[in-house]
Image (cartoon, grey):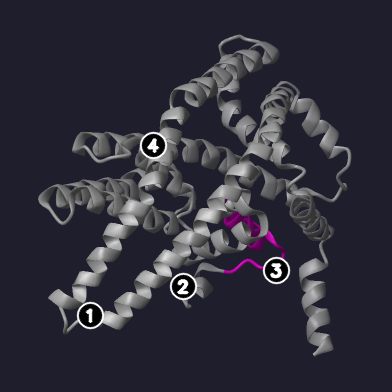
Amino acid sequence: MLNVLLNWYRRRFSDPNAVTLFWLLVGGFAVIYFYGDILAPVLAALVIAYLLEWFVQRLIKIGLGRSSATTLVLLVFIGLMLLIGFGILPAVFRQGMTLVKTGPVMLANGTEYLKKLPQHYPDFFDASLVDSITAVIQDRLVNNSGVLVSFSFTSLMNIAVVLVYMVLVPLLIFFMLKDKEHLLLMMKRFLPNNRELANRVWLEMNDQITNYIRGKVIHILAVSAANYVVFAFMGINYALLLGISVGCSVLIPYIGAVAVTIPVTVVALFQWGLSSDFAYLMLAYAIVQTLDANILTPLLFSETMNLHPIAIILAVLVFGGLWGFWGVFFAIPLATLVKAVVNSWPGSTRTEASIGSY
């Protein structure tokens, strides 16, 4: 057994470039795992810098200097964020508070409906089971009400942190974009010389991460806008809140679409009941979801379509459990990184015939 392990180690780690890549990956994962909370503004700034780099490059091509292009792009970005912050978010917050206030009424109507089911369908529903379900729902509501109160106080305590981030993150973005080449050269000075394999993986992942972040932002905006238009046209309550919720659900592949369908269905049922309006809304919602899954998502993320759905779900669960929001956001690029490392690792290549034999 020991000889087998030693042979495997020599075969996989005989190349110094592979050892360098291994320790770089271990070090990077360890830093983010143990210091992720401290580095949160740096990670947020890095993501936004990746997003804005495309616009900076376009302005440089038309003759602007990098400093001027960075300043212009960052000012436009801050203006858009202020527009969203003062124009859209207050309306979303108001709709969210209204929905929270009407939650107990919706729950009461739902429990009353459940209690009537054994009377109308005695062969399918047991009265004691329905009573148990309603008791559990009411108990969870009482517990969650306390959680909401504590969450509101916690949110007030975090306002100072948000204000600091509002100043710190734009500064980080500006210097990441303005001094990009200098920062990359400075980082290379601390890397080992045997980094050919690491450079190859980095070049492959750099383009994919850039395309992924830009595509994900476009995806969220497009899905939010499309669902808001459908909800507003159909006249459902909380159209803006639900539309943005559906858009943000694309951050979690497969799972998010299922989870966000529940509040959409509950709000529609509470507003219309089992009527034709409810059926039309759910049909329109299903059409939008189908167009997103079959047209928009493959168009924006064609490079990630080679990942199996099970691999994507596992990546969301594993990396989300390790790093929370950022793990979920970067689940697909991280899964792609694992795949790229496995494919590039010495001794891991397979012929097409051997792959096809599985």
Counting residues from the start of the chain, the first of labels 2 and 1 encountered is: 1
Q: Quadrant of the N terminus?
A: bottom right
Magenta span: 333-350
- State which mark lies toward you, 3 or 1: 1
SS of the residue at dot 4? helix
Image location of residue 122, percent across then percent down: 16, 82
The three-letter code of the residue at mark 2 reads Gly
Q: Is residue 83 left or right of residue 73?
A: left
- State which mark lies toward you, 3 or 4: 4
Measure the C-alpha gap from mark 2 to mark 1.
51 Å
Q: Disc 1 marks which residue?
A: 125
The three-letter code of the residue at mark 3 reads Gly
Q: Disc 3 marks which residue?
A: 347
The three-letter code of the residue at mark 4 reads Gln
Q: Disc 4 marks which residue?
A: 95
Residue at horizontal 75 percent and vertical 42 percent from the top: 39
Query: Is residue 329 something that shows in the picture?
Result: no
Counting residues from the start of the chain, the first of labels 3 and 1 encountered is: 1
Q: Residue furthest bottom?
A: 1
Counting residues from the start of the chain, the first of labels 2 and 3 encountered is: 3
Q: Is residue 97 above or below residue 335?
A: above
- CA neighbours of label 4 inside 10 A, class few (<14), some (14 to 19), many (20+): some
